[in-house]
Image (tube, rainbow, N blue to C red):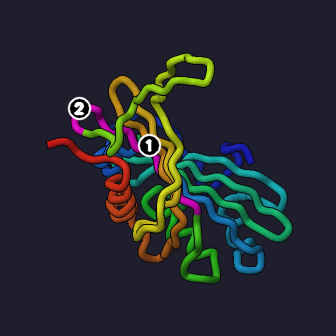
């Protein structure tokens, strides 16, 4: 579904504003992927709000009512015969926009999705992109490091894929690399979202704690 056809998300971008809660933790983005059974999803209300029908994909921007929140949302997915696939992506950087009456807003998007689902919570794959500055962060092992190949070439490894042990953060994988200015990490979590109580500030605070498994802040 083209964004211009969505009654729920049609807004006009005016200006980019300062970063907010995500940037406080050196977080660039957070992505939530849901796979919901059709019989647990209120498709009638969803279609009335968005104009999306069965078989259609949608991809739209959702902006904050208060730009001081410092983030915006990409809301996308597809309604299939048996399942509804939904992705909600939070990105650093808010926009000042001209809102239409009744439009969705970034602060309430997750709670609104929850109002369409029979169960109060749902399992989700969460991906989080961090860019920790090299001036204050380092990995807990040498990165980059050099290796010698079987044909005697010396290579520099500046990134690795890591399977994490069982942990309280529900993190299971990280891609970690070191660039010129930042230690870049994409962390995967298997978590449950409580829609009614969802708070992105609390979420990023909790997700950021997993970084301590593979990186440390220098004093």
The residue labelled by disc 2 is: 135
Residue at horizontal 71%, vertical 61%?
85
Residue furthest to the bottom in view is 119
Indicate whether 203 appears above or below 24: below
Residue at 38% x, 34% y: name it.
Answer: 143
Q: Earlier in the sequence, mark 2 or mark 1?
A: 2
Q: At which x and y percent is residue 122?
A: 58, 74
- Residue 125 horizontal/vertical position (percent): 58, 61
Q: Is residue 218 above or below residue 153?
A: below
Q: Which is the main secondary structure of the residues drawn in magenta?
A: strand
Query: Please, what secondary structure does the residue beneath circle 2 have?
Result: loop
Q: Is residue 2 above or below residue 16?
A: below
Q: Give the residue furthest to the left.
A: 219
- Magenta span contains residue 34: no
Horizontal side of residue 219 vs 77, given as left or right: left
Tell me the magenta residue range: 125-136
Kindly identify which residue carries mark 1. Answer: 185
**Residue 60, percent across and down?**
62, 47
């Amino acid at each position: 579904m083209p964004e211009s056809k969505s009654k729920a998300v049609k807004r006009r971008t005016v200006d980019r504003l300062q970063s907010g809660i995500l940037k406080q933790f050196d977080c660039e983005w957070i992505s939530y992927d849901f796979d919901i059974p059709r019989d647990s999803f209120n498709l009638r209300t969803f279609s009335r709000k968005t104009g999306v029908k069965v078989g259609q994909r949608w991809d739209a921007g959702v902006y904050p009512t208060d730009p001081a929140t410092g983030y915006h949302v990409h809301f996308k997915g597809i309604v299939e015969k048996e399942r509804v696939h939904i992705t909600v992506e939070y990105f650093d950087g808010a926009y000042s926009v001209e809102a239409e009456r009744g439009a969705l807003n970034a602060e309430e998007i997750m709670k609104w999705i929850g109002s369409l689902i029979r169960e109060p919570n749902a399992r989700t794959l969460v991906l989080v992109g961090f860019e920790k500055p090299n001036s204050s962060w380092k990995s807990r092992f040498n990165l980059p490091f050099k290796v010698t190949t079987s044909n005697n070439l010396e290579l520099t490894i500046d990134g690795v894929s890591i399977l994490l042990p069982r942990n309280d953060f529900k993190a299971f994988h990280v891609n970690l690399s070191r660039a010129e200015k930042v230690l870049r990490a994409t962390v995967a979590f298997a978590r449950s979202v409580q829609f009614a109580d969802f708070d992105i500030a609390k979420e990023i605070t909790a997700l950021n704690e997993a970084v301590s498994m593979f990186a440390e802040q220098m004093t």
